[in-house]
Image (tube, rainbow, N blue to C red):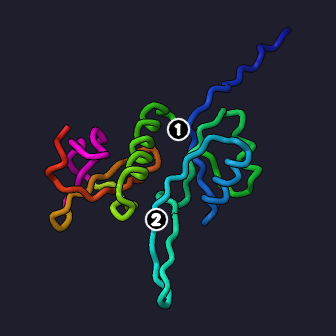
Amino acid sequence: MKLPEPTFNFEPQWFVAHTRPRAEKKLAFYCHREGFNHELPTVRTVRKYRGKTCAFDNPLFPGYLFLRISPVLKQKIYQSDYCARIIHVPFQSEFDAQLRNILLAVHLADPNEILLAPQITSGSRVRIKYGPLAGIEGIVTRRDGIALVHLTLDFIGKAAAIRLDASQLEPT
């Protein structure tokens, strides 16, 4: 009796690497060195220490690195010792679109206007009408007269928030 040949999926897919504490940049460097396609959205933070100012690029989503690799390469990520677990993304196209929106916002928006939104609150879905982020959709909440547009990454339950004037938004 002949056993069926195993089938392997070699097409790149999105995976979310949940990193060990404070190891996002180390895992990103490992992936860069090994030639793995990855994304680590960062935001610039500025701190003042005794009269000197220091700027840091911190991960927008602490504890997460986004990988677009073949499933057969997952084991190689664990060899870095910076990865706690790898999470499969079931809805690839939706995740890809959401991550692209966040990456676009990180690259085009004023670095002081992007921040991690610790939880996604209920609100109306909106689309940005004009400016460098035109066409991006998100969820809006109001705080102190400033509209915060949450660009969600539903799979991990996180969001990035951008401060915008409400006149730039339209309901979807």
Left or right of 4, for residue 166: left
Q: How many marks?
A: 2
Magenta stretch: residue 137 in it? yes
The answer to which image quadrant residue 14 occupies is top right
Amino acid type, mark 1 = Val
Which label sits in the foreground, 2 or 1? 2
Q: Residue at x 64, y 62 (%)?
A: 23
Secondary structure beneath dot 2 equals strand
Whether residue 63 is visible to the viewer of this picture, yes or no, is: yes
Q: Which residue is mark 1?
A: 89
Amino acid type, mark 2 = Arg
Q: Which residue is mark 2?
A: 44
> What span is in magenta?
122-142
Residue extending farthest to the bottom is: 50
Residue extending farthest to the right is: 1
Image quarter in which the C terminus is found: top left
Image quarter in which the N terminus is found: top right
Callout 2 touching callout 1 (CB < 8 Å)? no
User: Between residues 13 and 42, which one lies in front from this camera angle?
Assistant: 42
Q: Which mark is residue 13?
A: none
The image shows residue 24, relative to residue 66, as above or below, that is: below
The answer to which image quadrant residue 68 occupies is top right
The answer to which image quadrant residue 146 occupies is bottom left
Q: Residue at x 45, y 31 (%)?
A: 93
Whether residue 118 is visible to the viewer of this picture, yes or no, is: no
